[in-house]
Amino acid sequence: MHRFAIALTAAVVAISATAAPKATKPVAAPTEASTPTPATKNADPFGLELAVATLAQTRAKYGSELSDAGTNAINGGRMLKATNPSVGPEGLQDALLVFDKEERLVAVQMTLPKHGNAGPVTEMANQLRKKYAEQSRNIPSVGNAMVRFERGNSVILLEAPHMSFAFTVTYLTKDFQNALKTAEAEKAKAKERRTEGSV
């Protein structure tokens, strides 16, 4: 399990990958009665379906809330940023929307306040479970929290670092998640080569 953080910068998407807490609790597959009935094939943050919604559709729907955030380093696609938007969950601090070169939405990261406790994290996880199939959950009273969901060709990661005053909810297509993994692996290899060459 990896943790991906999409940095809110104008030109790059930064990646961080750390092992998930060992205490992560697997979640049994939802029963037929509890399985969410999806309105869309993939996750649809802000009502925008991943791999389907376009840059033009996004601007038309939320144009006044969005500003250009440059090009991401993973796939060369455009990025849009929303700061304190009037859309999304209550308390939303900011959001980054990432598109591919074909201008299809491939990732969204929302940042929300923790208010110094796990309450908002648990509440958000419970809300997400109503829409998406929960795969694993680890929300300790002390420590890093991680909850993973899936729908179709998309993954939703809720991450709450212990010492942070905020937590993130990141929606990604599985293709973009794989691209992140590849980029991180290449970055690690390049760092290793630089280290070997300097000693």
Image (cartoon, rainbow, N blue to C red):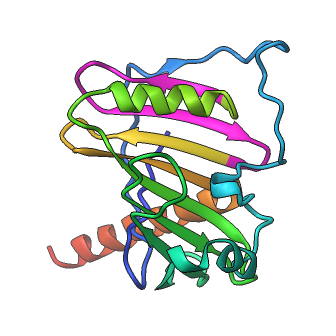
Quadrant showing the C terminus: bottom left
Q: Is residue 87 magenta?
A: no
Compared with residue 135, is residue 8 higher up or lower down, i.e. above or below?
A: below
Which residue is at the front of the view, 156 or 123?
123
Which residue is at the front of the view, 137 or 69?
69
Compared with residue 93, is residue 131 higher up or lower down, i.e. above or below?
A: above
- Quick one: which residue is furthest to the left in this view? 199
Taking the spot 73% from the left edge, 73% from the top edge, the residue there is 104
Taking the spot 63% from the left edge, 53% from the top edge, the residue there is 45
66 to the left or right of 192: right
81 to the left or right of 49: left
102 to the left or right of 140: right
The count of marks equals 0
Q: Main secondary structure of the magenta part?
A: strand
State which region is magenta: 134-154
Which residue is at the front of the view, 131 or 92?
92
Compared with residue 72, is residue 132 higher up or lower down, i.e. above or below?
A: above
Pinpoint residue 163: horizontal percent, then vertical percent: 18, 40
